[in-house]
Image (tube, rainbow, N blue to C red):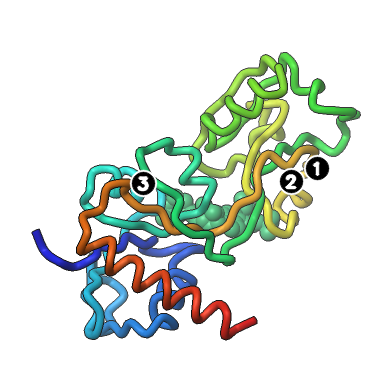
Amino acid sequence: MSNLLRIAIQKSGRLQEGSLDLLKESGLSFSNGKDQLKTQARNFPVEVLFLRDDDIPQYVEDKVADVGIVGENVFFEKQKKNELVKRLDFAKCRLSMAVPRSENYTDVQWLNGKNIATSYPNIVKDFLQKNNIKAGIHEISGSVEIAPGIGLADAICDLVSTGSTLLSNGLKEVEVVMQSEAVIIASPDLDIEKQKILDKLLFRIEAVRKAKN
Ligand code: PRT
Ligand code: ZN
């Protein structure tokens, strides 16, 4: 077993830059080369693995990585044995229900008996259960916003930040299911050495945050 803390971050996408910046601002330095699978910090016992964000919770549960940086939405959807260690204040968005603009949406009961397209079936299932609604869930992995227009679903549940994607697809946001931001997740039983490295890193992250405010 190596005494490096292995941190999984997104290989490319909306979380990648913020995740790397966070580590760099915390004083870690890396030899550059974005196309690699992993890289070791020069001055801190950390190794960074570059992965698809959706795969990170599983890698952390399997202890291939010790910690990971993912959107809270992915953390909750994947339902793995991971702990949410820290919210990071970037990649903020919300997971929302949206329906065609022409619909006369009154309240959440409108969803009863409808079909909802989403990439987040588990979170949607919980939301429907909490609100006592019976609706169909149609899982699709991308371009969820086109589903109502092509007759695949009555509503969607998808990530929103500015809302312009919904707007340009003739949809309106009607319910916020959850707020999300980038978070650090960790395996619940890290060994003492790795926990110490993580604590040191968290301390630095907090110091950077305080210095910014
Ligand atoms: O390839 P990989 O699987 O690693 O990446 P990915 O395509 O699954 O994820 P990516 O990079 O798109 O998003 C990673 C994470 O960023 C998400 O899980 C969220 O936690 C977070 N995030 C923050 C967002 C957004 N903001 C966001 N706006 N993820 C997606 N979007 C989408 C939104 O659904 C819409 O389609 O971006 C589009 C623009 O949004 P509007 O509302 O500004 O139009
Ligand atoms: Zn993804």
Q: Residue at x 32, y 60 (%)?
A: 8
For residue 54, side relative to residue 138 (left or right): left
Looking at marks 3 and 1 on the same chain, the residue that comes earlier in the sequence is marked by: 3
Kindly check if marks 2 and 1 are in contact, taking CB atoms under 8 A apart as contact: no
Q: Is residue 50 left or right of residue 73?
A: left
Q: Using the image, determine if residue 60 lies above or below residue 97.
A: below
Please name the amino acid that badge 2 sits on: Asn
Label 2 beta carbon less than 8 Å to ligand 1 = no
Identify which residue is drawn at 67% across, 35% down: 156
**Quarter of the figure with the C terminus:** bottom right
Crowding at mark 1 (Cα within 10 Å: few <14, some 14-19, many 20+): many
Q: Residue at x 48, y 46 (%)?
A: 74
Marks 2 and 1, how far apart at CA: 9 Å
The correct choice, above or below, for 89 with respect to 177 in the image is: below
Q: Nearer the viewer, mark 2 or mark 1?
A: 1
Residue 169's tag is 2
Q: Are marks 3 and 1 in contact (CB under 8 Å)?
A: no
Q: Which residue is mark 3?
A: 57
Q: Badge 2: few (under 14), some or many (20 or more) residues near its Cα, within 10 Å?
A: some
Give the side of residue 41 with respect to residue 148, left or right.
left
**Ligand 1 near label 1 (Cβ, under 8 Å)?**
no
Residue 28 horizontal/vertical position (percent): 33, 82
Residue at screen point 22% across, 84% down:
42
Q: Secondary structure at mark 2?
A: loop
Question: Considering only order in the chain, which callout, 2 or 3, is on the residue closer to the N terminus?
Answer: 3
In the rendered image, residue 34, in percent from the top left (x then y), is placed at: 31, 75
Q: Which mark is residue 58?
A: none
Cβ at disc 3 under 8 Å from ligand 2:
no
Relative height, residue 105 to residue 78 (above, below)? above
Which residue in the protein does label 1 denote? Answer: 172
For the residues carrying marks 3 and 1, which lies nearer the camera in this image?
3
Name the residue type under label 1.
Lys
